Amino acid sequence: MNTDNTKIKMLVVYSSFITCGGVERFLLNFCELFPSDQYQLDLLLFDDDQDHAKMFDMIPEHVNVLPFLRQYSRWSPELMEELNSSGLSECVKIKNFIHERNMDPEFKKKSPGSRFEDNWNLLQTICPEYLGYDIAVAFTNTLPLKIVAEKVSAKKKFVFMHLDIKAGIEFKKNDDSIYRYEEKYYNIMDGIVCIAKQNADSFVSYFPELANRVQVLININNKDLILQQAEEFYPAEYQQGSNNLLTIARIHPQKGIELLIETASKLKNADISFRWFVLGSYHVKAYTEQCQSLINKMHLQDHVFLVGEKSNPFPYYKNCTLYVQTSVFEGRPLSIEEAMSMNCPIVTTNFSSASEQIEHNVNGKICGHNAEELGETIAELLQNNKERIRISQGNINYDGTEGIKKYLEIFKCN
């Protein structure tokens, strides 16, 4: 650790960049926030795995990436061999035990929160301690939260909550045991950071006694850099002069990809000319295959394209005709704010915090979560150039820097 006592020593804990998503892009933006002459910023990850967008390679140069917690990576025979060859036989023993227990039918009968807690009781024995920090940040709950709570010594501790947990639980039809078992770790945090008011309200509905620790800090991004990167190329997938629709989302049920495909079918049947591109990781292989099968079944191969991750998505924003978000639930999607930075006309489903980013009929259109309304709204904007321009102009003053001052005020020693 740097011994420069004049700098604020901050530790940020996350899992990996294996998924190219809004949380990962937001983490990169977060790391850029803090001046290197004032902060010593250490980043602790489980591994250097990354998606095709190579987001791990985008970590700012001033960030010190600590030795990986490989023992917390997803179990695989290859990982066990690697840990063994590194002399971490105790880690192998514990990882193998957890892996086998997770498949045990009796163990599966326990609630998810109980299972995770039982596993943490073992995993915490193979986690180093991280001492001497001014600030420690768990960039999500689950394992990063538990590491910061129990394995890090810091004057102040924070955790980021990126989702509306109530909406997530209802969508997945899960119990709330994961969050209930985490309550004791939230109690150790000095601040619980939610990126939307709706997320904060949802969290407080579960943990009203923690309301005074909850803070809302909105997403931030670097508009000047976004605009610069947007000029690097014209997307080869786009066709000049055609209606190119864009959605930035991993292929996951939460993101409403089936609704997107159904909406595309409505547009096609209405003889609307369009090509719809979805940029994001193939997060769940079976679901990706299901979505591609649905595209084929609806004969949309020339209309809907699951493109995968892109290291620079901003030329896609800049040159799209319309940006569309089809999510079932969200926290505060960075993709919408990136679209706002690019002055895109935006259509979004009415997920719980949508109105915190989009003012209906001012800088975008908010629709019900159904293909009919989405299709009609998209068709209207594609056919009305004047209205599309009016909506895009609603974002002209957005620069993504509104919350920076508040971040710098909160993430300091005193």
Image (cartoon, rainbow, N blue to C red):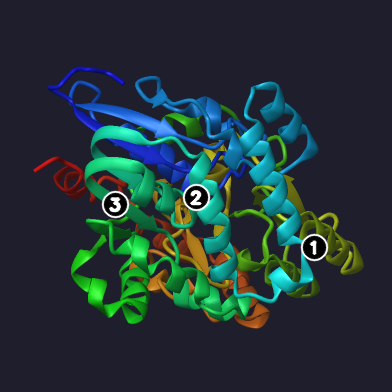
- The earlier-in-sequence mark between 3 and 1 is 3
Seen in the picture, residue 252 relative to 280 is either above or below; the reply is: below
Q: Secondary structure at mark 2?
A: helix
Q: Quadrant of the C terminus?
A: top left
- Please tell me which residue lies in front, 132 or 35: 132
User: Where residue 121 appears, x then y in whole percent?
Assistant: 51, 55
Q: Residue tagged by mark 3?
A: 158
Among the 4 quarters of the image, the one containing residue 315: top right
Question: Going by the image, does 137 lie left or right of 72?
Answer: left
Q: Residue tagged by mark 1?
A: 291
Q: Residue tagged by mark 2?
A: 22
Q: Residue at x 37, y 72 (%)?
A: 355
Closer to the camera: disc 2 or disc 3?
3
Closer to the camera: disc 3 or disc 1?
3
Question: Going by the image, does 110 lie left or right of 44?
Answer: right
| Crowd band around label 3 with a 10 angstrom C-alpha radius: few (<14), some (14–19), many (20+) | many
| Crowd band around label 1 with a 10 angstrom C-alpha radius: few (<14), some (14–19), many (20+) | many
Amino acid type, callout 2: Gly
Label 3 close to label 1 by CB (< 8 Å): no
Label 2 close to label 1 by CB (< 8 Å): no
Q: Secondary structure at mark 1?
A: helix
CA distance for labels 2 and 3: 19 Å
